[in-house]
Image: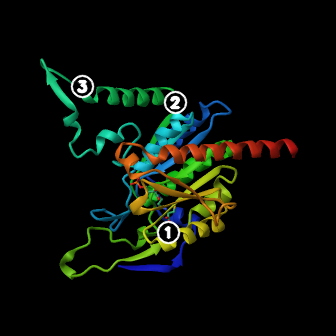
């Protein structure tokens, strides 16, 4: 596989040359409705979750995938809801979803939670309480109009939907948080360079040529939602690179927070980089024992970010008053 690091495509050109997802209009209408039904001081968060795919063929048989189960995003969405946020959950189809996440990807499968008693199918007693709680929460938040789920599969779906949602919430300003936990590919094959049909093996080894994905955080922060509170995630596997890359992202895009995590320790430890704490980031960590006992680090991450978001809103209101 050869990666073309030199040819950078600007974000607008990207949208001109790639097809939008089939759910774009649906998502536009639903997000528009969702936002309009919220009260004027409702805090809203867009949580992105799961990995994007990059197809190798226009009629796609094969694709390159980015790693992410969707745990970070789905668990965080639950936590944001518990803290009173309205949540737009932009997630990779078939990755973990809020409230459902404890059952859908379990290796034992959904049937292992059920039993038949006197002909009736019911949830096994040991699962009743937890499932009941998750079901109640899911129904409550969706019926109250506090949770909206929008799905993507490819990188291109994700980028179109991210831009669409951004433009719909931009005017709400500081009370909107972007929590960009989705694992987004850095490389792709533009539609016009892709093989139309399934790549054939008859011609031997396969060499792929991939372009760099335009840096969408730049237009997001600068043009699409300049007033919103933006949290991006930085994932690395080499510990030497994590700090420098997180600082670099902050400097380059000028947004509020970079949450940095290592692939192997992401469930126990993250660092929060901000302009003020670029050299000395806050650490959020929980023990391996806590993780094994079912505690999610997302509770602490979201609590801390919600606190900082509140501060950001207060500062913005202060500035409005003194302007
Ligand atoms: C993350 O770093 C997320 O925390 C994880 C969560 C993907 C590690 P899981 O879904 O994993 O709980 O299994 N997300 C961001 C990854 C990413 O693509 N970041 C880009 C980068 O690192 C910047 S937007 O360059």
267 relative position to 118: left or right: right
115 relative position to 232: left or right: left
Which residue is disc 3 drawn over? 125
Q: CA distance from mark 2 to mark 3?
A: 30 Å
Label annotation for residue 269:
none
Disc 2 is placed on an element classified as loop
Task: Name the residue nearer the viewer: 238 or 206.
Answer: 238
* Residue 212 in view of the camera: yes
For label 2, count other residues whose C-alpha is less than 10 Å away and answer few (under 14), some (14-19) or many (20+): some
- Quadrant in which the N terminus appears: bottom left
Label annotation for residue 213:
1
Among numbered discs 1 and 2, the one appearing first in the sequence = 2
For label 3, count other residues whose C-alpha is less than 10 Å away and answer few (under 14), some (14-19) or many (20+): few
Instruction: Return the residue found at the far left.
Output: 118
Which residue lies at the image location 40% right of the left edge and 73% below the top edge?
193
Label 1 CB sits under 8 Å from any ligand 1 atom:
no
Which residue is disc 2 drawn over? 145
């Amino acid at each position: 596989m050869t990666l073309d690091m030199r040819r950078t495509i600007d974000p607008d050109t990207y949208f001109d040359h790639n097809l939008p997802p089939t759910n774009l209009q649906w998502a536009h209408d639903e997000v528009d409705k969702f936002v309009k039904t919220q009260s004027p001081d409702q805090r809203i968060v867009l949580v992105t979750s799961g990995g994007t795919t990059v197809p190798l063929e226009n009629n796609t048989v094969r694709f390159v995938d980015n790693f992410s189960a969707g745990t970070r995003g789905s668990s965080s969405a639950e936590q944001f809801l518990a803290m009173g946020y309205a949540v737009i959950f932009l997630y990779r189809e078939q990755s973990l979803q809020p409230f459902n996440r404890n059952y859908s990807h379990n290796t034992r499968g959904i049937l292992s939670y059920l039993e038949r008693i006197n002909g009736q199918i019911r949830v096994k007693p040991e699962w009743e309480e937890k499932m009941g709680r998750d079901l109640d929460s899911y129904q409550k938040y969706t019926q109250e109009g506090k949770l909206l789920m929008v799905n993507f599969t490819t990188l291109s779906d994700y980028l179109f939907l991210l831009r669409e949602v951004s433009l719909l919430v931009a005017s709400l300003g500081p009370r909107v948080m972007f929590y960009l936990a989705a694992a987004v590919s850095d490389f792709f094959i533009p539609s016009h360079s892709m093989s139309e049909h399934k790549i054939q093996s008859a011609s031997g080894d396969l060499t792929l040529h991939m372009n760099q994905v335009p840096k969408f955080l730049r237009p997001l922060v600068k043009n699409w939602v300049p007033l919103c509170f933006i949290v991006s995630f930085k994932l690395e596997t080499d510990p030497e690179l994590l700090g420098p890359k997180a600082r670099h992202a902050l400097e380059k895009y000028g947004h509020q927070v970079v949450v940095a995590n290592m692939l192997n320790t992401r469930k126990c430890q993250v660092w929060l980089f901000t302009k003020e704490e670029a050299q000395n980031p806050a650490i959020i960590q929980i023990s391996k024992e806590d993780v094994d006992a079912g505690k999610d680090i997302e509770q602490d991450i979201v609590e801390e970010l919600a606190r900082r978001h509140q501060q950001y809103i207060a500062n913005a209101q202060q500035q409005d008053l003194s302007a």
